[in-house]
Image: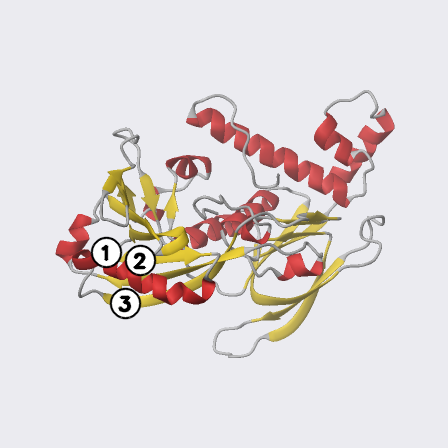
Amino acid sequence: AFISYFHFGSTQENRISAGNNNMRFSTSILLALAAGTPSASGLAFQGSSVRHSARAATRSRSALEMKYRVAVVGGGPSGACAAEIFAQEKNVETVLFERKLDNAKPCGGAIPLCMVGEFDLPETVVDRKVRRMKLISPTGVDVDIGETLKPDEYIGMCRREVLDRYIRDRAIGYGATIVNGLVTAVDIPRDHKTNPESQYTIKYAEFQEGKSAGTAKEQKFDVIIGSDGANSRVAKAMDAGEYNFAIAFQERIKISEEQMSFYEEMAEMYVGDDVSPDFYGWVFPKYDHVGVGTGTVVNRPAIKQYQKAIRERAGDKISGGKIIKVEAHPIPEQMRPRRVNGRIALVGDAAGYVTKCSGEG
């Protein structure tokens, strides 16, 4: 609920307005919870019920006037958006932890057009505007699944290192403090659900330029947003439970200009047991190369075999290309059993918020 959108109406302007209003409302409710306001959960789901007394409303207002320290652990899209939202609140000090500021997370990198508008992204973060997408069968028969796109619509192809950095920088511009560090532990006080004065302790190793080892430090916070991916330390600390996951494997391949011209506005998805028994393989164009990859849940040890097959299926279109980067990462298959615990909330892959049929975050 913290980084979600309720779409009212059909226009892009309405969607953006609804999204911003919903995020503001969610922020207010979370801060009310941080203050231990008994009626906060009721306000979140019951609206203006007659059961909420004037006294409770007064307590909510005073709660929203208090000062809070919020830690956002993980600087991917969901974490950076959370930091951006909190940083705009005058009573919130926001600290964003990211272990690798130049991180290029393994990701196909396709984003829907609505995301460009709803997240107010400049077109500079989009490497390619794909207007044709083919789904290719095991026998080589292809179906154009991009025919529904209107002339002014496209599927954006981006590099995660570019997208993530842009949203993080915007959060910093609003006042969030960035810590280049690895969170090593999250200490949760026993009374964190009942005592609004109790604080969480985040222990981390802060990295500095020119030094190989991090410096051990710790800070205390009133609220924690866990956006630290599928292997989330925050999720483990709050006992969020386990979930099944896929392994995604991708190679970034530099191909010739002639080959690249084929993928100018084209992306490909391959299906068949040779490339994956339960997922799909892809060739997605980037700025000056293509991302070629696949994934699987049911047979993770065979991921390199499936990757070899997707390269073979792409054939002459990528032959002779130079592999410039190899990436692998787990992708959640469903939500974790618990995504909120006291004043800790999970978002993104840490929570398991993934579209199951496509693996989209």
> Quick one: SS at disc 3?
strand
- Distance from disc 1 to disc 3, alpha carbons, whole Å, reads 14 Å
Give residue 74's position: percent from left, percent from top. Answer: 56, 57
- Distance from disc 2 to disc 1, alpha carbons, whole Å, reads 9 Å
Looking at the image, residue 258 lies above or below residue 18? below
- Distance from disc 3 to disc 2, alpha carbons, whole Å, reads 10 Å
How many residues crowd around disc 2 within 10 Å: few (fewer than 14), some, or many (20 or more)? many
Dot 3 or dot 2: first in sequence order is 2
Give residue 29's position: percent from left, percent from top. Answer: 70, 37
Q: Which residue is mark 3?
A: 323
For the residues bearing labels 2 and 1, Cβ distance under 8 angstroms: yes
Q: Which residue is mark 1?
A: 314
Amino acid type at image mark 3:
Ile
> Quick one: SS at disc 2?
strand
For the residues bearing labels 1 and 3, Cβ distance under 8 angstroms: no
Q: Can residue 102 be seen at all in this image of the molecule?
A: no
Quarter occupied by residue 41: top right
Looking at the image, residue 358 lies above or below residue 315? above
Dot 2 or dot 1: first in sequence order is 2
